[in-house]
Image: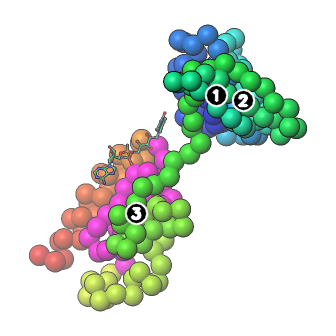
Amino acid sequence: MIVVGGGNSAGQAAVFLARQARCVHIVIRGADLGKSMSRYLVERLARLENVTVHPFTEIHALDRTDRLAGVTMRRLSGEQTHIAAHALFIFIGAMPDMQSLTDCVELDRAGFVVTGPALSTASLDTDAWRRLQRAPHFLETSIPGVFSVGDVRSGSVKRVAPAVGEGAMAVSFVHAHLGPLR
Ligand SMILES: Cc1cc2nc3c(=O)[nH]c(=O)nc-3n(C[C@H](O)[C@H](O)[C@H](O)COP(=O)(O)OP(=O)(O)OC[C@H]3O[C@@H](n4cnc5c(N)ncnc54)[C@H](O)[C@@H]3O)c2cc1C
């Protein structure tokens, strides 16, 4: 099996897959896993005899019949290696799927929802904000009273605990927003 990527998600996948697969190949463009993966995972992977890390390497081509049959990897030096493989897992980062909100709330350049202090002056220059006469709450989007939490929020820590915490915080911001309007 082949795992592409050098982050924690790739590391966790490789540890998991190594329990069932004969060999797990981790393909990374960098020199080693240490730059982007937590140390505990790097050390755990180093202890697994059926895991091989391929540094300075990219996926070059896939062979298939009715399913994946093999993968050709290319090192930055140009050298190519072919590996028979029936599964390829790609962990190279997440993209927000926020197209439906493009014309609705402010998004950052990567497409994440902008909130609170990070909102642009242009977003705050609306009658809705002027009527409220207050700054946006920390998790509030460019639409007053609409809040964003978790991975989709620009600048958030992309982990479970912060997502849950922000969800709880948002409830208090909803009360703070609605209170003066009653
Ligand atoms: C492989 C992997 C491993 C990870 N490992 C860890 C880890 O070990 N520890 C850790 O802390 N974090 C880990 N994370 C990150 C963690 O999963 C996220 O940070 C966390 O789930 C964010 O929660 P969230 O509620 O913001 O988003 P999500 O958990 O992604 O929830 C968003 C929900 O919204 C739904 N949704 C999307 N669009 C719409 C729509 N238009 N209408 C209705 N519903 C919609 C989705 O289906 C989904 O259920 C990992 C992530 C991945 C991908």
Say whether mark 1 is within 8 Å of ligand 1.
no
**Could you tell me the amino acid type at mark 3?**
Gln
The mark nearer the N terminus, 3 or 1, is 1
Kindly indicate the quadrant of the structure image that contains residue 114: bottom left
Checking the image for residue 99, the label placed there is 3
**Extent of the magenta region:** 135-159
The mark nearer the N terminus, 1 or 2, is 1
* Depth check, front residue: 168 or 42: 42
Q: Is the residue 48 above or below the residue 121 in the image?
A: above
Q: Rate crowding at label 1 as few (under 14), some (14 to 19) or many (20 or more) other CA atoms within 10 Å.
A: some
Residue under circle 1? 63
Q: Using residue 174 as the reference point, say whether residue 54 is left or right of it.
A: right
Residue 123 at least partly seen: yes
On the image, the x and y values in percent for residue 35 come to: 72, 40
Q: Is the residue 87 above or below the residue 58 in the image?
A: above
Residue under circle 2? 72
Task: Specify whether residue 97 is painted magenta.
Answer: no
On the image, the x and y values in percent for residue 59 come to: 69, 36
Viewer-side label of 3, 1 = 1
